[in-house]
Amino acid sequence: MARGLEEKKWATLAVLALLFSIAVPVTLLLVLRDRDQGPSVHDPRAYDVDEGDVSLEDGLRRAALELPECLHERLRYALVDNGFGYYHHIYLKLESSEQCMNSFLALNAMDGDLGATTLGGVAAERIPIYRSRWMDDDVVRRLGWQIGPEQRFQRFSVGKPTLYGVFVLVQHVPGSSDVRAYVHAGRGA
């Protein structure tokens, strides 16, 4: 009887070893195949610091951010891993008309300083009272964003159900009727 149990134990171990020897190479093959699907298509709107492993659409979905159609052509972006893999810091530079920017603010339920929900004129732009950490991080410097301490903005923000904090600095473009926005979204930001 002990011999029969011993044979069953060895037979079970042999089957498990066979399954394992098949499962590991197949899994590796699938992972490598998914990772190397040939040359990826580079989005010309992406900054060089964009890591390219998450599409803009997927990053926006993760952060529960929406962009109106009027912003799709005149935007630049970078998605940078926050060190935990799934969550990324999202950097967007948007240029548009005031009407389009107000659509963006409304779609994302943004509130500005003093409860504003839409853009004011140039006179409403102020030097930010405090500087968030993201405004001075290395990525912002590498993007070439002009958000130094002397710059004036209208500031908007919202906390999303996805636990992303979204901050928007908007200013009127000198010599134009357009506005420019610098957007940062980060989980726990």
Image: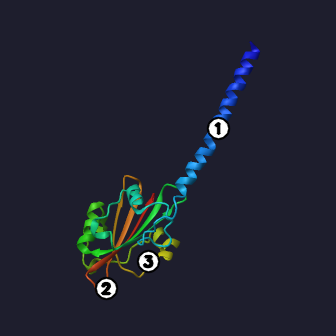
Q: Secondary structure at mark 2?
A: loop
Which callout, 2 or 1, points at the residue further toward the start of the chain? 1
Q: Which residue is mark 2?
A: 174
Cβ atoms at labels 1 and 3 below 8 Å apart: no
Look at label 1 and name its amino acid.
Phe
Q: Residue furthest bottom?
A: 175
Can the viewer see residue 137? Answer: no
Q: Position of residue 82 (x, y in %)?
A: 52, 60
Choose the circle earlier in sequence order: 1 or 3.
1
Residues at marks 3 and 2, CA–CA distance in whole angstroms: 16 Å
Instruction: Please name the amino acid that badge 3 sits on.
Output: Trp
Q: Position of residue 148 (x, y in %)?
A: 44, 79
Which badge, 3 or 2, comes first in the chain's sequence? 3
* Residue under the image location 33 percent in, 72 percent down: 73
The answer, for residue 57, to whether it is visible in the render is yes
Q: Residues within 10 Å of mark 1 (few under 14, many from 20)?
A: few
Disc marking residue 145: 3
Which residue lies under the disc numbered 1? 20
* Residue in the picture at 38% in, 74% down: 128
| Camera-side residue of 170 and 27 | 27
Q: Please name the amino acid that badge 2 sits on.
A: Pro
Q: Left of 34 or right of it: where is 18? A: right
